[in-house]
Image (cartoon, helix red, strand yellow):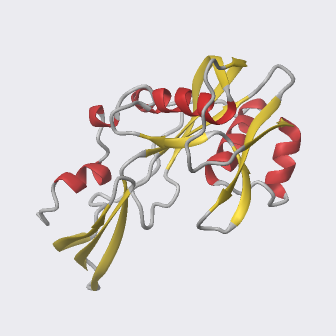
């Protein structure tokens, strides 16, 4: 069934920006502060965190319907986390290229079948981060398996149904992992919708081929 577009205001952007100041820049994130006036009268500052790389993840399923999970210590949370193989897609590579590499590096696997599963913005109130999630099957050992020198990883396979329970129990909390598992469950329970073709193409294109407005803004901080 085709869905009608969700409603939106005739003039959706209520902000007038007078100044944008870069505060921090690194190979991974960048930070700026914008000064704005809202059309309802409020004036203030908006801190925006930009992600240089795209968030990418893959729900890799084996022939026994088990999910490949990777365990690692998450520094900001100071806790151990089980999650899908994930990584930051470099601007010079597509999400697909990034995840083929990450699946081999983190889990020692390749996949014979790949398809886009879900796209979302993990934290759209403060960042421009975009997340591309794949479904991958027909798994086989990779010829190379070399985690990065700042990674200590465990690999585990967990039945898909058990993963869903662990999401609801609060054991699996990583954002891309939760979204991917629930997206596949939605498919399996009959909620089927074709992804917009232009969005699906982005899974196989480099970010420079489709700059999203928020991410393109970093190339021009002129307030106009």
Looking at the image, the residue that sits furthest to the front is 149
Residue 97: x and y in percent read 47, 27
Q: Is residue 206 above or below residue 35?
A: above
- Image position of 43 with respect to 178: above or below: below
In x, y percent, where is residue 173?
Answer: 71, 57
Of the 4 image quadrants, the one containing the N terminus is: top right
Q: In this view of the protein, which residue sits in the foreground, 151 or 85?
A: 151
Tell whether 167 sits left or right of 125. Answer: right
Q: Is 142 or 188 nearer to us in this picture?
A: 142
- Image coordinates of residue 133 in percent, x first then y, are 57, 37
Query: Is residue 10 in view?
Result: yes
Q: How many tags in the picture?
A: 0
Tell me the quarter of the picture where residue 89 sits: top left
User: Quadrant location of the C terminus?
Assistant: bottom left
Residue drawn at (28%, 63%), measured in percent from left and top?
13
Report whether residue 193 is seen.
no
In-image side of 79 versus 159 (left or right): left
Q: Is residue 36 above or below residue 72?
A: below
Q: Is residue 110 left or right of residue 129?
A: right
* Residue 77 left/right relative to 189: left
Residue pictured at 61% horizontal, 23% vertical = 144
- Location of residue 96 in the rendering, given as x and y in whole percent from the top left corner: 49, 27
Q: Along the line of sight, which residue is nearer the eye, 121 or 66?
A: 66
């Amino acid at each position: 069934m085709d869905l009608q577009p969700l409603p939106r205001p005739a003039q959706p952007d209520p902000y007038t920006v007078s100044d944008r100041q870069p505060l921090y820049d690194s190979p991974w994130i960048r930070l700026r502060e914008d000064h704005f006036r809202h059309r309802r009268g409020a004036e203030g500052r908006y801190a925006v965190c930009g992600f240089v790389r795209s968030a990418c993840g893959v729900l890799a399923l084996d022939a026994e319907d088990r999910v490949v999970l990777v365990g690692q210590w998450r520094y900001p949370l100071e806790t151990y986390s089980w999650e899908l193989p994930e990584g930051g897609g470099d601007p010079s590579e597509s999400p697909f290229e990034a995840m083929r590499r990450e699946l081999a590096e983190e889990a020692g696997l390749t996949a014979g079948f790949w398809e886009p599963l879900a796209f979302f913005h993990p934290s759209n109130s403060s960042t421009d981060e975009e997340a591309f999630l794949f479904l991958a099957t027909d798994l086989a050992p990779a010829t190379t398996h070399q985690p990065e020198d700042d990674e200590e990883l465990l690999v585990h396979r967990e039945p898909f149904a058990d993963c869903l329970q662990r999401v609801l129990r609060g054991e699996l909390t990583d954002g891309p992992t939760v979204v991917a598992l629930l997206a596949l469950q939605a498919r399996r329970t009959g909620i089927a919708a074709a992804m917009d073709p232009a969005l699906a193409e982005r899974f196989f294109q480099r970010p420079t081929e489709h700059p999203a407005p928020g991410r393109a803004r970093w190339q021009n901080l002129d307030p106009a």
